[in-house]
Amino acid sequence: MKRSILVISFIICFNAIINAQNNNLSPESLKEQAYRSLSNGKYAEARSLYKKAYEDFAAQGDYVNAVECGLKADSLYVKEYFFKEAFELCRNMDAIILKGEEKENKKLFDLRLLIVKERLRMYMILRNTERAKEQLAIMDEIGRQANNEAVQEIILNAKANYYLTFGPVAQGTHYYDQLLRFYNQKGNTEKVTECLRNMITLAEKTNNASLVVSIYKQYTTWTDSLKTIAATKKLTEIEQKYDDAQNLLKEKDNSLSSRQYIITTLCVLLVILIAALSISIIILLRFVSITKKQKNDIRIAREYSQSKSRFLQNISTQMAPTLDLLTHAVKQISGEANQPEKIRIQIDSLKSFYNDVQELSQLESSLDEPYELKNYEVKTLCENIMNKVKPHIKQGIDFQLNVFKTEIKMNPEQLDRILTHLLKNAALHTETGKISLEFKKKGARIHEFIVIDTGSGIPEELRENLFKPFTEIKDLTKGNGLGLPICSLIAKKMNGELMLDTTYKKGSQFVLKLHT
């Protein structure tokens, strides 16, 4: 007694473990496992797996796979004469398809037809002709609504099978004739052969000897015609091969007489090739000469650039002591004689110009030395910049930030300098409207920072030289014009590019593109 209880307990636990494992499988895995079980003759296990796969596919909204697995499970129910469960599963599938039609807002005629076809098969097995005819009527209605050749083929097949099984036989052969004409029009000889074989099988099942003889004659005539067609095709292929062989012989005869012309042509081509090679060598030597000259020109231009940078650095260095003395003197004069603030502002502007010239020179001479980059959070950096620039924004101007959280490779200090300069410029030239800072991803390694304002904009005559230094004479107290050239050089050292969007007409739009 105890041993029996232990065995039963073990079986229950084993089934529980198997069910738990099945619950963790994807519906695709359940479908494959069910197929293997069916192939091994484990029908109960296959039925259970197909039903579970059907439920999971239905839950995912994959109605095609759901119906396929549901019909497999249904046929296994029928195989074991569990008709009650089979009809219940068909009703469940009808409900699932209705839900799918409401969700997708379209009729799923092909899936509905498969379920009705399975229900018809079960009624035919049960010899329930009245209910079977009801299914045929439903199939006709689906065919009328679907207006689809594939659907009509299934319906014709179902009607032919039904009437050959239950009579009248003439009606069954009528539908089979329609089906044969359909396949012939499509040129599908395999389907015609299969259809005739099915007719013979059904006629044999109904013990209708005259029908068997009639269909068998039709089948024999059809197979003979196929053999004739195949033989004709084979003969045509042999004739084609013969013609090809004859043509090949003629070509060989012609080739013997044309060889001398080929040899002559090859000699001419060889001469042309030698001439072309000689010309190529001359062009190559000239190209090498030009390349050497260009390299020399580049070297001279680089030396000139370096000497210009050294000149600017020397001038800046020589100006520094004088500017310091002037600043000190102005402070004394202002303290003693209450001189105007204007002198101090001009000297400060001159000193700022000196600092910018020195930085510009250093940036130009170190362009081939990129900044060190590191991963940094974009939104945090931009929020800090916005807080720093807010005091410079005029009252009534909408100050916007459109940046999402992400990390990119950058030099945060130098990026802060560029964006701060652009936003302060925008604040200076915008009286009404808005100023915004945006960030966009243009690819896996391309990012853009965009500063937009509704200010006065950049005059068209200044746009071409906007990022070039010393292109205009300015009052240094109103800016020295070196801010944007410096920002452009910093952008290059970060493997980026600073641009003005000339298509923007409502103010100014600067784009900083970084390649990370």
Image (cartoon, rainbow, N blue to C red):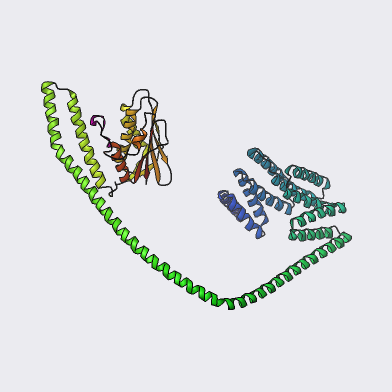
Which of the two residues, 171 or 416, is positioned nearer the viewer here?
416
Where residue 223 appears, as percent x and y from the top left, is: 79, 65
Q: How many numbered tags mark residues here?
A: 0
Using residue 263 as the reference point, say whether residue 175 is left or right of it: right
Where residue 377 appears, as percent x and y from the top left, is: 36, 40
In the rendered structure, does residue 479 fall within the stretch colored magenta?
A: yes
Q: Residue drawn at (65%, 48%), measured in percent from left and top?
A: 64
Which of the two residues, 124 or 283, is positioned nearer the viewer here?
283
Q: Quadrant of residue 107?
A: top right
Q: Which quadrant would the N terminus be assigned to in this image?
A: bottom right
Residue 203 shows up from this direction: yes
Q: Residue drawn at (36%, 28%), measured in percent from left and top?
A: 456
Residue 83 shows up from this direction: no
Which of the two residues, 371 or 342, is positioned nearer the viewer here?
342
Q: Which residues are magenta?
A: 473-482
Extreme residue toward the right, this view: 210
Q: Residue drawn at (20%, 28%), measured in percent from left and top?
A: 345
What secondary structure characterizes most of the magenta part? loop
Placement of 455 over or under 135, stated as above or below: above
Placement of 186 over or under 507, stated as above or below: below
Where residue 127 appears, as percent x and y from the top left, is: 82, 50
Using residue 343 as the reference point, say whether residue 107 is left or right of it: right
Q: Quadrant of residue 259?
A: bottom right
In the rendered structure, does residue 502 fall within the stretch colored magenta?
A: no
Which of the two residues, 81 or 206, is positioned nearer the viewer here?
206
Where residue 317 appears, as percent x and y from the top left, is: 16, 41
Using residue 102 as the reference point, say whether residue 25 is left or right of it: left
Q: Quadrant of residue 422?
A: top left
